[in-house]
Amino acid sequence: MAELKYPVGLQTFSEIITENYLYVDKTEIIYNLVNQSKYVFLSRPRRFGKSLLVSTLEAYFKGKKELFQNLAISSLESTWTEYPVFRFDFSGEYFNRLDILIEHINGLLDDMEDQYGLEVTTGTISRRFNLILRKVYEKFGQRVVILIDEYDKPLLDCLHNDELHDNMRNQLAAFYSVMKAADKHIKFAMITGVTRFSRVSIFSALNNLDDISMLPEYNAICGICETEFHKYFPESIESFASKHKLSAQEVWIAFRREYDGYRFAREGEFIYNPYSVLKAFRFKELGHYWFVSGSASFLVNLVKRHCFLLGDLEGAKRKAAELSDISSIGNDFVPLLYQAGYLTLKGYDPHTKEYTLGFPNHEVSEGFWESLAREFFIDRIGNNCFSTVKFLDELYDGKPDAFMKRLKALFADTESQSESNKEIHFQNMMAISCKMLGLTVHTEIRSSAGRCDMIIETLRYIYIFEFKVDGSAEEAFAQIIKKDYAGRYGIDCRQIFLIGANFSTTTRTLTTPWLIESLSESEDE
């Protein structure tokens, strides 16, 4: 049996179909969409199939019926009318100057004039767009389909340059406002991107724009849902299982842990990351394919610039309106992480209308914390200081003093001078350290008496930590005793260590001495 051809990185629908690559059929959803909406906006993370969706729409509206044989839409569509299609793709350029944006759009408009045999137009990009729309409509007697892919790329490229960002936004707003004035010439328009800047929307003129990003019926318009995973990949699962001497069930569990877990609406199946799934089946190896395909540097820059508290990400709660807007990114990191694919929807409370968010899967969680660890702890990652094996050995062997010495050395090597909030910086370092260890670690544990900073549990030991910032180890230890943080372990047979410590924002590390007391002896001692 011939090996399946996986369309890794392919975004052209016609190539996938004619070259017999595997295609996960989304055409029923597409048919329903184009028959229910005229102006559509869709936000999805990078490499999630947005460009393939746009390419599929382009083939559909150009009436290429032959490409859709044996797909769901072939039994739904009967007319297959050919429409002129204007496609604007912003994914292949780096927009660090306004003139690059204008030149890019002018180049796309030049191509449209050539494609439809029009005379050359002049003037601003807005004027040219309006003229070309009208001329194509008049020449062919058919309304125009407009497909805008990765609309936000110019805005994301200059996210940290406020003046340039405003200029880009204003130029794009004027350009897209043409669609409102030319409504009678437009059949359908779809705009895709990673993010949405709601409060300063460049689509404010399109007051009838349908944002389908969080609607349950379009939850699976991109990506691979559980039903599709089992429908399209049984051969892939068997092949992967054969190579690694696993059962099909074990392969499914592994893929689910690594790549599943996305959800973009309050209802619907969880979604697998399509890029990582295709890569893993293509090479028959699990890997962090999606995470390493992009740069996480913007995460680090934002954390350091705005002092976001990382320990609060898992389980964060936000309303839909908050998740749809990254205009206030300086105040809230969560919406951008959600739209970029680092967080996803985990639950919904109909009473408060709040969504609970979390990391979708192991690939994203591990990649996220590793990338931040490498930046926070510079070159310590991978050497003896941040050897997870040594950290774990010290905890498993009941050596809290050695653990604290290693933690102190790790923190001392960080560069936190740029951090405006030293306390949050310390809390972030602790959160990153805990995640990297992969232990049963609890932070900010709530009890009737208060909140304990951190508890680490192993098979034989329990470590209860309280930290002060620019205080004293004595204060921290006294709080453990006063609020009886160990009380919850009253009948636990494991040895309990109480650890009070202080972090100095001057030296940027733990101060000595810290206080350690063994509360009980384990049964094995």
Image: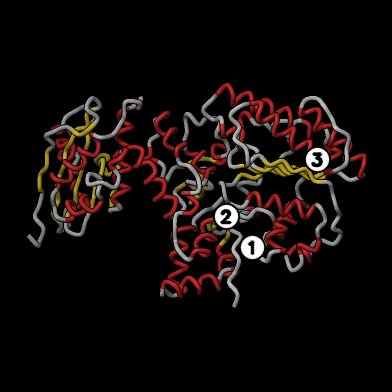
Q: Residue 128, image x and y in percent?
A: 81, 30
The answer to whether 170 is drawn above or below residue 427 in the figure is above
Badge 2 is on which residue?
Answer: 267
State the image quarter where residue 14 is shown.
bottom right
Task: State the residue at coordinates (48%, 51%).
Answer: 346
Q: Are marks 2 and 1 in contact (CB under 8 Å)?
A: no
- Residue 54 numbered mark, or none: none
- In whole angstroms, how far apart are the C-alphas of marks 2 and 1? 21 Å
Disc 2 marks a residue whose amino acid type is: Glu
Disc 1 marks a residue whose amino acid type is: Val
Name the front one of labels 2 and 1.
Answer: 1
Q: Residue 72, image x and y in percent?
A: 73, 65
Disc 2, SS = loop
Badge 3 is on which residue?
Answer: 112
Badge 1 is on which residue?
Answer: 24
- Which sits earlier in the primary sequence, circle 3 or circle 1? 1
Density class for disc 3 (Cα within 10 Å; few <14, some 14-19, many ≥20) is many
- In whole angstroms, how far apart are the C-alphas of marks 3 and 1? 30 Å
The answer to whether 400 is drawn above or below residue 468 in the figure is below
